[in-house]
Amino acid sequence: MQYQVVGDRVVCGSARFSALSQGLVRLEWSATGQFEDRPTVQAMTRPQALPFQAIAWTEAGVLQLQTELIQIHYRPDTQPFNDNNLQIEWRCGTQKGSWTPTTVDSANLGGTFCSLDLIHRNLRPTEVHPATVERAYPYTQEWLYNPMKKAHLSLRDRGETTRFEEPPLWYLDRYRQEELPEEVRQVLQEWHRFPPGILSRSGYSVLNDSASAPLENNWLAQRFDPEGQDWYFFAYGSDYAQALQNFVQLCGPVPMLPRWAFGVWFSLFGQLYDTDYHNLVKQFEALDLPLDVLILDVDWHLSGWCGWDWNPEFFPDAPTFLKQIHEQGLHVGANVHPEGLAPGDSQFQALCEARGLDPDDVKAGKVFAIRNPMSSWIFESWHPSGMAEYKPTQAELETGWLLFNLAEPEEARLFMQVLHGPREADGIDFWWIDGSSAIHPGVNSQLWTNHVYFTHLANRSQRPMILSRTGGMGSHRYPAQFSADTYSQWEVLQLLVDFTARAGNVGVAYWSHDLGGFYNHVPGVPYIDPELYVRWVQFGCWSPVVRLHSDHGKREPWAYGQWVLDAVRQAFQTRIQFLPYFYHLSRIAFETGLPLCRPLYLHYPEDPVAYEQPTQYLLGDRVLVAPVVEAGGYRSIYLPVGGWWHRETCKFYQGAQQLNLYVPLYQVPVFVKAGAILPLQPMALRAGNQPAATLLLEVYAGDAGDLDFYEDDGMSQAYLTEAGSRRRFTQQQASSQHILTCEAIRGTYTDMPAARNFQVHWIGLTPHSRVTVQGAEIRDLCWVGDRLEVTLPQVPQAASWQLVVTEE
C-alpha cells in the first residue's frame, strides 16, 4: 500500500495526515474514506495544512511523515489507529517523547469546568485527571445541580425527607456515596479532579475531535463518518505559549471584551425595583466607588425563571429606566433562562404560530416530551424567607411550554429575534445566560447556546459579550464566563485563584466570580466574614471581571463598616487605574491565546517551584499577584528568578525566594518585574469606552524593558481587522543615565484625540537626579523618595519623546 499527497495532506489507505504547524498535526482515520474538511464546533478555525518537511515509505511498509518537531510512523492496515499501527515521536528543545494511542499522561496541567455551582470547602477539585486520547470526562462540563437533584430524588424514593442542600452534596459524596445512583457517583468522582487541558509538563497533548459536530454554512451538520477518528497532536516541550497559539489558531481566537466590561459590576439575586438600582448607583457615586455595569437578575421579568416580559411592578417604564442608567455611563445586562417559553408570555401565541404549532396543543402538552422544564426543580426556595422565589401552581406545572432547540437554525432565529430583540431595543446591552437549550449530536448544549447568543449580538456594530457557564473545548470564543453558585468560605476563595489561572490552559481567559461567594455558610444570614469579603473583592479586582453578586446577601461595600469600605474602595480605584493594562492584555489574549491571568509555569516552565503555587499568578508577564486567601493577613509568596518590586512599598527583591509577609487589610501583595512599563490611568468612577485623556506610565527600574501598548475605540468590532493604535515604550540604562523612550503612535481608531497627556511614575531611581526631556515639555516634576513623578501635557500623537534621568 502506498500513499498519496493531496494538496498538502497525505492519504494512506483509510488514514489522512495534515501538518497544521511545526508542532501541530492532524490524524484522521475513516473506514469509508470520508474525511472531514468542514470546521467543527471545537476546531472552528482550523488552519490550512502545510507541506510536511519529509515524507518517506520504508521497506518495512511504514509511512514516515516529519515536521520540524514531530515524526509520524504509520503502518497501514484495516484497523483504526492503535498502538500497532501508529506511533509519534517528537522533540522540542531539550525535551522529547514517544506517543501511541493508549499512552496515559499523568502530568497534564488541567483545564476548566462548566462552572462551580455548589462548590464547598469539602467538595472541590484537586489535582488533574490523567489525559488520554481515548478518554473524556464529560461530567465536568455539566452542572452539579443535576446530580444533586438526582441524589435527593433517590433519597426521597426511600422515604427520606430532604430540602435544598439538606443533606448537602459534599456530605453525600463523602459519607453516603454507596446510597447514590451510579451516575451520580460517577459525576462526583469526575469532579474531584480538573479535566485535562492543552498544556502538560510532559510536553505534548492530544485533542480528540472525533465526535465534534461539523459546521456547514455556519450551522450544525452531521459527520460524514460518525465512527471515524479525528485527533490533533500538539508538541511543544516547555513552550507553553506556542501551544496556546496553536490551540487558538485551531479552535478560534479569544475575543476582546468591550472596555467598560473591565469596570466594576453589581448584581443581586433578589427583588429590586428600578428605584433600588437608581439609589444603588447614587450610593456608589457618593462614596467614590467606581461602577460600570448593573445586571438585572431573574426578577426583572414575569413567569418565574424563564420569561422575557418586563415585570411592571419592578420596572413600570423599563426603556426610560435603561435610558437613564445609560445616561449615567453604565451598561446593563439581564439574566435569562433559555429552557422555554411559558404560555403567559406575550409572545407565546405568535411564536407557536410562527413555528406552525397550535398553541392549545402546546399548552396541552401534546407537542413536546417535556411539558414544563421548570417542574424538574424539586426544591422549595433555598432562601429561608422564600423571597424572590417563583412558586408555580400545580396547574402551571402541568401546562405545556413552547420549547426551543437552539441547534435548529429557524428556532434559534425566532428565539433571538422575537424574544431578545425587543429587550435589546429597550436598552439591554448583553445577556447573562443561566442555562442552555441546544440538542444535536456532537454538541455540548451550553457551548452552542453560547454560540447562538454571541453571534446574535455580533450582528450589531458594538462588540458582543455574554455572561455564561462554559461548555467544554471552544468555550473561550464566547466570553465572559461566570463560576456561579459557590459557598462563602476561605477554601473556596483559594480554589478560585487556582481555577481562574488554570482555565487559560484551554483558552478561557475571562472567568467572573460572585465576589464574596453566592451562598453564606449559614442560610439566611446576609453578611459573611468581613475579612473574607475584603480579600475576595481584592482578588476580583486583580482578575478579569469584577462582579459583586450573592444569594440575597449583603455584598454592598458599605454594609461592613468603615475599614471594609475603605479597603474595598482602594481595591476598586486601583482596578480602574489598571484598566489600560487589562485592556492591553485583552488584545494580547486575542492575538496569541495567552490569558490575562497566567500560572507561574507559563513563563517559568523550567522552575519546578512555579508548578507548586496555585494561589498566585502572573497578570500578563510583568505583574505577579498573590491574593491573601486565609484569615489573619498572612501570605507566603514565591518570587521566580529575576528582580521584583513590591508595588505597595517599592521595596526591591531578588527572585527565586520565598517571602513571608503580613498584609494589612487594605493591601494586596502585588510584585512588578524589574524593567516593566505598566500603562495605567488616573482614577475615575467609570471605565467608559474611550481611553482616558491621560496615560500614566508606571516604570520600574533595574532592567531594560519595553511595552508595545495597544488602544482602540473600546467598543466596536473594528479590532477584528487590526484597527487600533500601537505605541512602543522602552527603558534602558546607559552609564549613569536612565532613558525612557516613547515612539510615535502607529495606527488610529475612531475619535482618537490629536494629543495625549502623559504622567510618568519611575520607581527605583537615585533621588534628585537631573531630569531632561526631548520632544515634549515638563509641566510638573517631583521626587517622592526614589520615585520620580513627571507630567508631560498635550503631546501630539504623532510625536516621539524621550525622558532622561542622569545621576550626578
Image: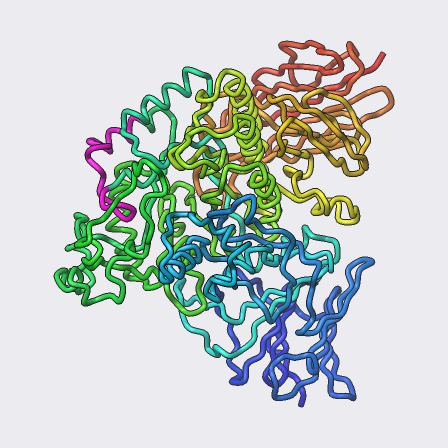
Is the C terminus in the top left, top right, bottom left or bottom right quadrant? Answer: top right
The range drawn in magenta is 302-324
Q: Quadrant of the N terminus?
A: bottom right
- The residue at the point 38 percent across, 32 percent down is 294
x, y percent for residue 375: 28, 55
Q: Is residue 480 visible?
A: no
Residue drawn at x 49%, y 49% as measured from the top left: 115
- Give yes or no for residue 312 being in the magenta stretch: yes
Residue in the foreground of this view, choosing between 273 and 10: 273
Occupied quadrant, residue 312: top left
What x and y, as percent, mark residue 550? 42, 36
Q: Is residue 603 above or below residue 546?
A: below
Residue 202 occupies quadrant: bottom right
Residue 245 as seen in the image, left or right of residue 410: right
The furthest residue to the bottom: 1
Secondary structure that dominates the magenta span: loop
Quick check: is 251 in the magenta stretch?
no
User: Would residue 50 be seen by someone viewing this image from the given angle?
Assistant: yes
